[in-house]
Image: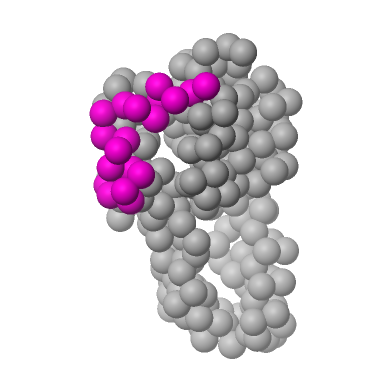
Amino acid sequence: MAPVKAVLFDYGMVLSAAPDPAAWARMLSLTNLSEEQLHRGYWAHRHAYDRGDLTAESFWNHAAAPTHAILTPGQLTALIAADVDYWATLNPPMLAWARSLQQARIPTGILSNMPGPMEAGLRARYRWIDEFAHNIWSHAVNLAKPEPAIYLHAAKGLRTPPANILFLDDKAENIEAAHAVGMQAIQYTTHAAFLHEMHARGLDHFLQLEGHTASQNGKI
């Protein structure tokens, strides 16, 4: 197996933790939708929104369509803010590990399916995003995982051949697509399972970098 020379992270459910239920409740209140209606509308159109095929206004009006009401500018602004909050809870162990890689001068990147308003909201909140060497956001390139081209964009940005990149994502289909372009990849479920898989692959030296002890204790 080729040596790992760079690490590429998904954002949602890898660098971030489980979504915030309080933010989801705000979206329910703002749209006047039932739980089932919001869940169906949100996910039915989310990929197109992440990819940049829909604007925020189009996405939220599609999601809220069962109410037969056009959202006001105030509602739209509040929904965008709630959506950022929904995905803003962080995963401290993985963030600490990413920081230890950066301190060791190992290139790191983010490859995330994410709409423009969310990228802007998270960047304004979290300055650590700029510490990654290269970030690919789906809306900016009008591509989204698991499309092969977006992985190749990320590899080019990291200036690292795909075979030398370790990619981490929570979704099996995105892991399969990474393998298809030649990347090494681990499906992230829990931090304990991630550590176990790293040991199994003989990548312990990446876990023993200065600062990673803190990641196992959940500190950043």
Instruction: Give the tally of numbered discs.
Output: 0
Q: Is residue 34 left or right of residue 90?
A: right
In the rendered image, residue 16, in percent from the top left (x then y), is placed at: 45, 53
In the rendered image, residue 121, in percent from the top left (x then y), is placed at: 38, 57
Color theme of the render = one colour
In the rendered image, residue 217 lying in the magenta stretch gets the answer yes
The structure residue drawn at horizontal position 64% and vertical position 68%, both measured from the top left corner, is 42
Q: Is residue 35 above or below residue 218?
A: below
Q: Is residue 73 above or below residue 216?
A: below
Q: Quadrant of the N terminus?
A: top right
Question: In this orientation, does residue 5 appear?
Answer: yes
In the rendered image, residue 78 lying in the magenta stretch gets the answer no
Q: Quadrant of residue 98?
A: top left
In the rendered image, residue 117, in percent from the top left (x then y), is placed at: 46, 56
The structure residue drawn at horizontal position 64% and vertical position 82%, both measured from the top left corner, is 35
In the rendered image, residue 6, in percent from the top left (x then y), is placed at: 46, 22
Q: Is residue 75 left or right of residue 103?
A: right
Depth check, front residue: 101 or 112: 101
Depth check, front residue: 170 or 67: 170
Find the magenta span and give its range. Answer: 202-220
Q: Is residue 40 above or below residue 176?
A: below
Depth check, front residue: 192 or 28: 192
The structure residue drawn at horizontal position 62% and vertical position 64%, both measured from the top left corner, is 59
The structure residue drawn at horizontal position 49% and vertical position 46%, both measured from the top left corner, is 192
Q: Quadrant of residue 208?
A: top left
Question: In this orientation, does residue 72 appear?
Answer: no
